[in-house]
Image (cartoon, grey):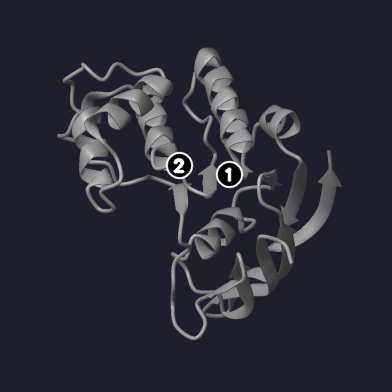
Amino acid sequence: MSYIELEHISKKIKSHSILNNITISMDKGFIYGFSGPNGCGKSVLFRIIAGLVIPSSGNIQISGKNLHRPKRTLPDSIGIMIDAVGLYPYFNAVENLSYLSSINNTMSKNDIIKVIQRVGLNPNNKESYGKYSLGMKQRLIIAQAIMEKPDIIIFDEPTNSLDESGVDLFREIVNQEKQRGATILISSHNSEDLEKLCDKIHYIKNGEIAKVVNK
């Protein structure tokens, strides 16, 4: 059995079908790309895998554990970058990550400093997150997704607002996380991101898998 198994996943909101009969298998330690136009269902699919949205039908297993059955559950180890991650605008980088890490209490102050440096930010910068440029905000959001070394990492449009150096750094981080053994899911409108990084790319159209390309 694959590490992540999606079987016949569908999602409807009222009478509108968002996803229709999605079946995907993903193995541990690989990078999977998801491409498609706005509104095709990529973000909803990611939210279902992250345990944030319950599918209308179908089954998800992660490492043999059912999500949402018999009751709603979350993956054991996951980092997510989906839509607008809720970082606190009046906290600086260290304060934001310290607050988030206090939930699981698995990171030291030094760990937090290292992950901020890893995404190209200065941990000594006392400027609040709300005053950051869009690129700086994106870097800190990437940091919160990877900081606890999760088994699964989901990146939804991660290179939006990043300059060229930020994109290069992101790609380096993704490859490092793959080498660590993480399973990584990426959606991007930048086809170069997917072609350079991903082992397999799923093309979604109108809530269905239209094509799968193995790299």
Q: Residues within 10 Å of mark 1 (few under 14, many from 20)?
A: many
State which quadrant residue 132 falls in: top left
Name the one closer to the observer, 105 or 115. Answer: 105
Q: Residue at x 55, y 14 (%)?
A: 164
Residue 182, labelled with which disc?
A: 1
Q: Is residue 126 visible?
A: yes
Q: Are marks 1 and 2 in contact (CB under 8 Å)?
A: yes
178 relative to 214 in the view: left or right: left
Q: For the residue marked with disc 1, what is the amino acid? A: Ala
Looking at the image, is 14 positioned above or below residue 140?
A: below
Q: CA distance from mark 1 to mark 2?
A: 8 Å
118 relative to 126 in the view: left or right: right
Q: Is residue 129 visible?
A: no
22 relative to 99 in the view: left or right: right
Looking at the image, is 60 positioned above or below residue 136?
A: below
Name the one closer to the observer, 151 or 37. Answer: 151
Position of the C terminus by quadrant: top right
Q: Residue at x 29, y 31 (%)?
A: 112
Q: For the residue marked with disc 2, what is the amino acid? A: Lys
Looking at the image, is 58 positioned above or below residue 116?
A: below
Position of the N terminus by quadrant: bottom right
Q: Residue at x 71, y 54 (%)?
A: 27
Residue 149, labelled with which disc?
A: 2
Secondary structure of residue under mark 1: loop
Residue 102 in the image: x percent, y percent?
A: 22, 48
Residue 173 in the image: x percent, y percent?
A: 54, 27
Residue 179 in the image: x percent, y percent?
A: 63, 34
Secondary structure of residue under mark 2: loop
